[in-house]
Image: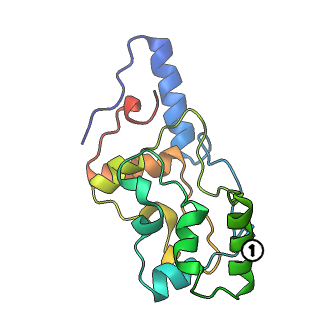
């Protein structure tokens, strides 16, 4: 288990103690963005792609292995299959419209953190943390929703459980 921040002054120590107390209580550092099922511009069925067809999260979110962000696939990637597969279905027709207009899909971000928190997907993937730990059983969700609180206290507890660093600089820099 990594070390926690070491306060150099009593004031800095008091600030750190307050931040940890708020984060552990689920208050400070709350996620930014909607909770619950959120209608997206295209009703993408994760349960079909990841569940029924068994596609890995990393097939579409391929930057999660090498970047801080998991990203979303470009429309061209989706159209690689959907030029042929299910081409007449209404949601695929919407997808094709974005492709023809050369527009990105304006997805509504569900898993977002405050600007002072730096979450690195690549570190978590390299450590063997399953996507479901933070994102829930996406392969079973028709409409994806945020299921983990993603608060500082929740993250610290996960780091404690896995023996990961809780040094402040690991996430706050």
- The residue at 62%/48% (across/down) is 31
- Quadrant in the rendering for residue 43: bottom right
- Quadrant in the rendering for residue 113: top right
- The residue at 54%/52% (across/down) is 150
| Of 19 and 151, the residue lying toward us | 151
Determine which residue is flagged by label 1. 94
| Of 153 and 132, the residue lying toward us | 132
Density class for disc 1 (Cα within 10 Å; few <14, some 14-19, many ≥20) is: some
Q: Secondary structure at mark 1?
A: helix
Pinpoint residue 131: horizontal percent, then vertical percent.
Answer: 42, 64
| Of 87 and 60, the residue lying toward us | 87
Left or right relative to 75: residue 127: left
Q: Is residue 147 visible?
A: no
Pinpoint residue 5: horizontal percent, then vertical percent.
Answer: 36, 26
13 relative to 53, above or below: above
- The residue at 42%/44% (across/down) is 120
- Quadrant in the rendering for residue 145: bottom right
Pinpoint residue 69: horizontal percent, then vertical percent.
Answer: 48, 48
């Amino acid at each position: 288990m990594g070390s926690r921040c070491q306060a150099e002054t009593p004031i800095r120590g008091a600030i750190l103690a307050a931040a940890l107390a708020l984060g552990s209580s689920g208050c400070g550092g709350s996620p930014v963005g909607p909770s619950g099922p959120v209608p997206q511009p295209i009703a993408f069925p994760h349960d079909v792609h990841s569940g029924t067809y068994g596609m890995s999260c990393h097939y579409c979110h391929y930057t999660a292995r090498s970047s801080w962000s998991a990203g979303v696939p470009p429309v061209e990637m989706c159209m690689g299959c959907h030029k042929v597969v299910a081409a007449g279905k209404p949601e695929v027709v919407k997808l094709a419209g974005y492709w023809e207009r050369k527009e990105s899909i304006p997805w509504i971000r569900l898993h977002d953190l405050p600007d002072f928190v730096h979450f690195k997907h690549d570190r978590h993937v390299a450590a063997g943390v399953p996507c479901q730990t933070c994102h829930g059983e996406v392969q079973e969700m028709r409409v994806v929703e945020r299921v983990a609180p993603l608060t500082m206290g929740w993250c610290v507890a996960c780091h404690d459980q896995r023996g990961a660093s809780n040094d402040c600089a690991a996430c706050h820099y």
